[in-house]
Image (spheres, helix red, strand yellow):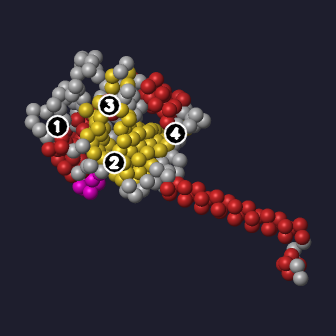
Amino acid sequence: IKQEQVLGLSPPIWKLIQLGIALLVIIGTGITEHNSQAAHADLTLTFLNVTSKGQPAGEAILVRTPDGKTLLIDGGMDASSLDTELDSRLPSWQRSLDAVVLTTPRQDHIIGLLDIVQRYAIGEIIDGGVLHPTTTYARWRRTISERNIRYLAVSQGTNISVGRFISLQVLWPVSPLHKGSNEVRDNGLILRIVTPGLRLLLLGASAQSTYALSGLLNTIDTTYLQAEVVQMIEETGIPFPKELDNVLQKANPTWLLLTSAALSKKQKTGTPPTPPLRKRAWQSIPTLRTAQGTIQISSNQITWSVTQYKLV
């Protein structure tokens, strides 16, 4: 007795059912294989060496996840340099980013992003907002609105998932934003990137803010400061506040990554950062600087590594 007769189905319908079952098996196998490949792919965080006329031009961090998500944090102040860096690291056909994060509206973080939001399709844009927008920041928000990009203003306590493998924990600023003499620095985003086997604390420009660092120590549980890698911005002629020592002691990182801020018109080209008057305890931590070449962190969810590609 034929199977289609037992089920009471005609031969054509039975063949369609068999074909459907075969397709489901193929699709299921493909999904399983894709998930397996994603589970074994590396997460990469690349601290780009964006420069302008050979000098540091701010911060830009490219994050790529095992499940194909792409995140750009800040953009430096030289659009051409950023374009070159992204073009060399993303497939030629890719003209989309899942998310863009602006940690501070300073010129050496936002200028490059103004070009990016024009050249790429952006899934979501994240920043901490500002109390008194500059002309550049107003243009930033206007462009976001004109291109109908989803915008999210975040504050302490916000958690954002980027795909299945990465979480962004917003540790700073608090809400409402702080009013003071340096609102841009004091209200900068401080992020903790958490992925299986690796935690990164991005202090960014807020590493220079006594207000923000004190706030972290007073409002954040110590466990949320712990990280294998800490990144921060260093500025020519400006020593880090003493509160940074306490934050780094809580973080207990294996590596420090330092990004040089863009030089202002008042600063002399090529002037190295002013060293502190005394040796700081955290200066014994192994340190890499993006001014000396692009830095890439790779993680396979079990182990991770840091590589610097020196300038030639």
Residue found at the far left of this picture: 278
Q: Which dot, 2 or 1, sits closer to the camera?
A: 2
Q: Position of residue 186 (x, y in %)?
A: 26, 37
Q: Position of residue 150 (x, y in %)?
A: 51, 40
Q: Which dot, 3 or 2, sits closer to the camera?
A: 3
User: Can you identify the residue that label 4 sits on?
Assistant: 97
Splitting the image into 4 quarters, where does residue 302 fall?
bottom left
Q: Which dot, 3 or 4, sits closer to the camera?
A: 3
Tell whether 281 sits left or right of 170: left
Which sits earlier in the primary sequence, circle 3 or circle 2?
Answer: 2
Q: Could you give the CA–CA distance between mark 2 and mark 1, rounded to whole angstroms?
A: 21 Å
Q: Could you give the CA–CA distance between mark 1 and mark 4, rounded to whole angstroms?
A: 35 Å
User: Can you identify the residue that label 2 sits on?
Assistant: 200
Asked if residue 224 is among those painted magenta in the image, a careful observer would answer yes
The disc label shown at residue 292, or none: 3
Q: Is label 1 in a helix, a strand or a loop?
A: loop
Residue numbers of the magenta segment: 221-227
Residue found at the far bottom of this picture: 1
User: Can you identify the residue that label 1 sits on?
Assistant: 241
Viewer-closest of 2 and 310: 310
Viewer-closest of 221 and 192: 192
**What residue is drawn where x is 45% and y is 49%?**
43
Q: Which dot, 4 or 2, sits closer to the camera?
A: 2
Splitting the image into 4 quarters, where does residue 9 fall?
bottom right
